[in-house]
Image: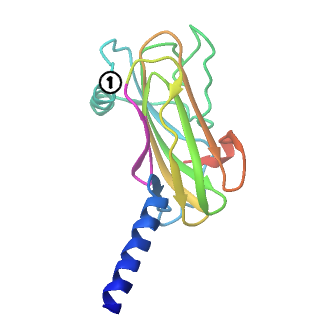
Amino acid sequence: MKKLFVAACAAVGLLLASVATAGVIELTPASPQPKNVKSGLSVKYFTGDRQVRSLHAAKSRIKQSSKAGKPLKGLNYPDKGRGANVLTAGIPELVVADIRGYIKFDTPGVYDLEFFTNDGAQVWISGKTVAKLDDITPCASAGRPKVKVPSAGWYNIQVLYFQKEGTACFESEWKKPGGSVQLIPNSAFGH
């Protein structure tokens, strides 16, 4: 009977621990850790297609044809109004971007992240989806995930982004363990 009680208590403890961490996405550092990282993020563009209205279509177009663009400084491109260029594409509309590189977390722990996009985007860190908005929308949140960073260092990041027409934005924020919400600085990105 004592063994059954101990087993039941262990099961309840395990259940409570998993509920407490539910919704936290566990990340894995890049392995090996990259050396000689350049600042910013690499990007490839596909432009000019009015039919891109979803992440599925954006992924298809990038696979068909894309050109390397000027690297992004980071992931903070606020809405500057109609006619402003999208990211570093040099044009104001009909842009699909495949963004890749690394994000650096300075300390281990749980971070709150948030990504804002106009129109759609999907963000992966360590190969895991941490944000997704698959819609034609004004600048809106693509999700507010919590991520568990086991150790300080560089982590792989990829973004698939599309902008149809009108205005554009892509912005990123984080709340470090014990900190307050702030824009993710350009210095946290590399490729």
Task: Pick whichever, 66 or 134, lies toward us.
Answer: 134
**The magenta stretch spans which residues?**
122-134
Identify the image quadrant of residue 135.
top left
At horizontal 72% and vertical 51% (from top left) the residue drawn is 179
Q: Is residue 104 above or below residue 135?
A: below
Secondary structure of the magenta portion, mostly?
strand
Q: Kindly state the secondary structure of the residue where label 1 is placed.
A: loop
Q: Is residue 5 above or below residue 27?
A: below
Amino acid at circle 1: Ser
Q: Which residue is mark 1?
A: 54
x, y (%) of residue 44? 43, 33
Most extreme residue toward the bottom is: 2
At horizontal 32% and vertical 19% (from top left) the residue drawn is 52
x, y (%) of residue 20? 49, 60
Asked if residue 128 lies in the magenta stretch, the reply is yes
Total numbered circles? 1
x, y (%) of residue 157? 48, 47
Asked if residue 62 lies in the magenta stretch, the reply is no
At horizontal 37% and vertical 27% (from top left) the residue drawn is 134
How many residues crowd around disc 1 within 10 Å: few (fewer than 14), some, or many (20 or more)? many
Task: Pick whichever, 124 or 60, lies toward us.
Answer: 124
Most extreme residue toward the front is: 1
Q: Is residue 104 left or right of residue 128?
A: right
Q: Is residue 135 left or right of residue 104?
A: left
